[in-house]
Image (cartoon, rainbow, N blue to C red):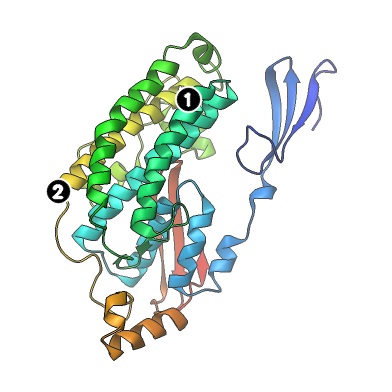
Amino acid sequence: MPIESEDNMLLSMGPQHPSTHGVLRLLVELDGETIVNLAPDIGFLHTGIEKSMESQTYLKALVMTDRMDYLAPMSNNLGYVLAVEKLLGIEATPRANAIRVILTELQRISSHLVWLGTSALDLAAMSVFLYCFREREYILDMFEMVAGQRMMVSYFRPGGLWRDLPEEFGPQLEHFLEFMPAKIEDYEALLKNNPIFKARTKGIGIISAENALSWGLTGASLRGCGVEWDIRKATPYIGYENYDFDIPTRTEGDVYARYRCRMEELWQSLRIIRQAWDRLPDGPIQISDRKIVPPPRAELGRSMEAVIHHFKLWTEGFKAPKGYVYQAIESPRGEFGCYLRGDGSTKPARVH
């Protein structure tokens, strides 16, 4: 990368760097502390997951979506599962969809807590980092209670869920909804009007709405520029049209605006979870088609037919019709879209 001025410094940041929280290399030209030019190298992040999914059945490919964003595995599962369901022409039960809403909004809060904590840590606010990870641990404990895993959950399945919520989940969620608002207020008290935090975020990294749209930005990065766009409102899925919530937006387009959007999203997620939990319907958590959904473990000990379905689904898989679909969801980082093409076999012909 050519340097604009001989007085500037050329710095190679990464690919392993404490402030990137991922494998990314940035070639940065600095004029003092001001970045005047930058060349990103994202090749380190390519893992070949999409191509690997094409060699697996639709069910087995699900576990790879967890690894696409380890901070939001529930959201990754959901985007892929909804695409598979659209290709199959099926829809999950009302109870399954309500549980999906609760868990993906918990995932949004968990992901935002990592963003907030690490961002504050990079600005030398270590207390915020510790507080955020304290609350995140509580959410991960709930995920472990539900899915048996804290992070790589693979809990959502085409046609429903792996299993229903355990009895102890309800009291845990109620306790979370009770104490979390005060915790968010604590974060705000430490950062919102902090002069050091504001000096390092206000007027920094300004992105115009026009540039944000031309660059394909989504999520809080787009909404922080004044563009009110949220997939949950624009093209609702799993019943989001039935919940009352707002889309936080700011017009400044700087780091502080994006911070404010994400902080408000924490409140909106709590609002959605409360509505979904209060209205959680009874009923099955899976569709009844055993050619798509594996039977519950309890059936395997008393039904030979269930054993046969279980064996065939996990060894051969189910066949999806020819065609292609695209399904987008609003993940914590923005739009998570899954393009899926079926060729009539048990494996996806293309995943992107």
Q: Which mark is residue 241?
A: none
Q: In which quarter of the view is residue 159 placed?
A: bottom left
Residue 11 horizontal/vertical position (percent): 77, 28
Type of amino acid under label 2: Arg
- Front residue (pair 65, 295): 295
What residue is disc 2 on? Answer: 279
Disc 1 versus disc 2: distance between alpha carbons? Answer: 33 Å
Residue 49 horizontal/vertical position (percent): 58, 61
The answer to whether mark 1 and mark 2 are in CB contact below 8 A is no
View extreme (right): residue: 6
**Is 20 displayed left or right of 78 in the figure?**
right
Residue 159 visible (yes or no)? yes
Which residue is depicted at the point 25% across and 52% down? 168
Quadrant holding the N terminus: top right
Q: Is residue 230 above or below residue 164?
A: above
- Front residue (pair 145, 334): 145
What residue is disc 1 on? Answer: 128
Q: Is residue 161 above or below residue 291?
A: above
Q: SS for tag 2?
A: loop
Q: SS for tag 1?
A: helix
Which residue is depicted at the point 74% across and 16% down? 31
**Circle nearer the viewer, 1 or 2:** 1
Q: In which quarter of the view is residue 318 placed?
A: bottom left
